[in-house]
Image: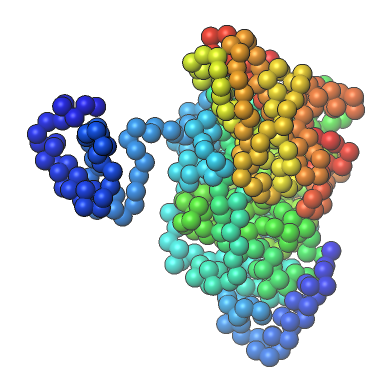
Amino acid sequence: MRSPRLWLGAIGAAVSILVLGFHSQAQSPTYGVGRTPTAEEIQAWDISISPITGDELPMGKGTADQGSELFLSKGCAGCHGTDGQGMIAPRLVKRDIATPDDPWQWGRVLPIRAPYAPVVWDYINRGMPLGQEGTLTADEVYSLTAFLLYLNDVIEDDQFELNQDSLPQIQMPNRDNWAELPEWLPGQPRLQGYPY
Amino acid sequence: MSSKKTDRREFLKQGAALASAAALGATARSASGQLPGPEAQLPGTDELVAYGKRSRFVDSKRIPHGGRHSPDQFGLDFHIATPLQDSYGVITPSSLHYVGTTRGSFVPDIDPDKHHLMIHGMVDNPLVFTMDELKRLPSVTRLHFIECAGNRANSRHVTVQETHGMTSCAEWTGVLLSTLLEEAGVQEGGDWIIAEGVEEVKGTSSIPMTKAMADCIVCYGMNGEDVRPQQGYPLRLMVPGGEGILNVKWLRRIKVVDQFYMTYNDYGHLRQDPADAALALQIGPKSVITFPSGGQQLPGAGFYEVRGLAWSGQGRVARVEVSTDGGESWFDADIRGEAHPMAHTAFSFNWTWDGEPCELQSRCIDDIGQIQPSRQQAIEFWESEGGRRRVKGQDNSIQPWRVDADGSVHNAIA
């Protein structure tokens, strides 16, 4: 993965850090622009959640029982339907059809398609509710995630506590049932063996 | 208009202009007498001096994509298609560039003096840049198209704006992402980046490091001026040849990570079938005839320059072929100007229509030999592999236009 050029860059960076010492105004090694963000800045900006390990998940907790109330009080039901059956916003509960072995046939439902539970948490935390994004607390996002997983039979106990440790442990139905994206190199066909 | 119809007041108003034209020795008169002058003149207002605008006789405009209302039921403008039927050359004017936003997005009104880009994660040297700092770094200026994964023609579409209007091409200026990543020092195992915007959903796309280091650009310039707000002002990521949603707007953060993060914008790339996933990531070889195209009317038999656009997410357009008999026989079209990598490329074909009903098609062949398929070819390929009858991934199949005996032009997708 790492090119010799990158190694040189890394060595350069290391040398710069040694010369400049660690301080908040450090600049980029080659061009001397930009500055080093503080740890607090990075933490404030970094809302990404590692899908498998959930590394960056904040402390918090919630249950499906609590989530079911938030689903109404936060207005989720107004767009997704009282039972998550979908209205003007997408469906959130799997379809009851005769394909028990293939979760991909259960509908385009995020809490089923997501191979890892932190992906569901990230989506709610980032994108919901429409028009009031970023207003949910960590506890509320854990509760709503628990409720969606409960609606889709991924967790069976509506009192089960979802938190930063238990969420990555959830076994999603598509855990090993999704397609890796190809390595994307210039000059390569978009799919080997496909002439078009 | 005849000069006799010009009344006295208009004549006086034009007097100064005519006098200056005469002073410059302009050929306002022919040897045999006076040429008809313009009907009216545009006033030199402060506004037009400061920032020009197009003629009031030009009404080319964008439309909501896919027959959706815009704004939609949530009061949001969602996807807006560019009028390809009116385009000349390869650059889409910034005001007519297609717009696609992630679900729920509005267009942020960002003060560039307060905007920053942070690069962090698996790097030795996390960095924050102001806009002014980014503009000090070595830059590139390149032509690139952006195309939405939803740019999929169907039989209900009438015009080329409806069938193909979710692609556009502009000249983009900015810093290579590789420059910024090298400054930050990517650590071992940093095989992906995630790029995030500031809009309300913090739309984020995962991009393989191989692509990020190859040719992605952190852009502040578009067609010679600042990137427009609908395109991500003050900063947008350009991922040449990639599906539209990868080109993150209002870019504020790039995190180097060890894996595909499956985040908000990535939902469409989360697929069961590896072919679907791959074919939705990189745009295939594609082309479309923009003249004559659906909804247009030819006045009668005779000469026409058939014109169109071709592009490939992999590299340069090597060749474009045109058929006037529904794909039975193919002829080389002329490439107009230079074919740039991952850019719209204009083509033309000299055609004399005999007045008989016919079907026009074009197909693109790129510089590694990928060839644009007919809908039937793409479907048959997947059917022979045991799949369902559909075009997988982003649809790059040939667009057929039927010309009827009366000169009317129609979408010929069955």
Q: Is residue A112 left or right of residue B350?
A: right
Q: Quadrant of residue B176?
A: bottom right
Res. A161 in view: no
Extreme-left residue of the structure:
B8
Looking at the image, residue A16 lies above or below residue B309: below
Res. B169 in view: yes
Q: Is residue B197 left or right of residue B124?
A: left
- Kindly identify the residue that appears in the image at 59 percent across and 31 percent down: B307
Q: Quadrant of residue B363?
A: top right
Looking at the image, residue A143 lies above or below residue B284: below
The front one of B31 and B56 is B31
Extreme-bottom residue of the structure:
A19
- Kindly identify the residue that appears in the image at 57 percent across and 75 percent down: A34
- Kindly identify the residue that appears in the image at 68 percent across and 20 percent down: B324
State the image coordinates of residue A157 (x, y, percent, origin top left). Answer: 75, 41
The front one of B301 and A34 is B301
State the image coordinates of residue A148 (x, y, percent, origin top left). Answer: 68, 39
- Kindly identify the residue that appears in the image at 64 percent across and 47 percent down: B338
Q: Is residue A176 left or right of residue B107?
A: right
Q: How is the image coloured?
A: rainbow
Query: Which quadrant is the N terminus of chain A positioned in?
Result: bottom right
Q: Quadrant of residue B270?
A: top right
Looking at the image, residue B132 lies above or below residue A88: below
State the image coordinates of residue B315 (x, y, percent, origin top left). Answer: 73, 48
Query: Which quadrant is the C terminus of chain A positioned in?
Result: top right
Looking at the image, residue A91 lies above or below residue B21: above
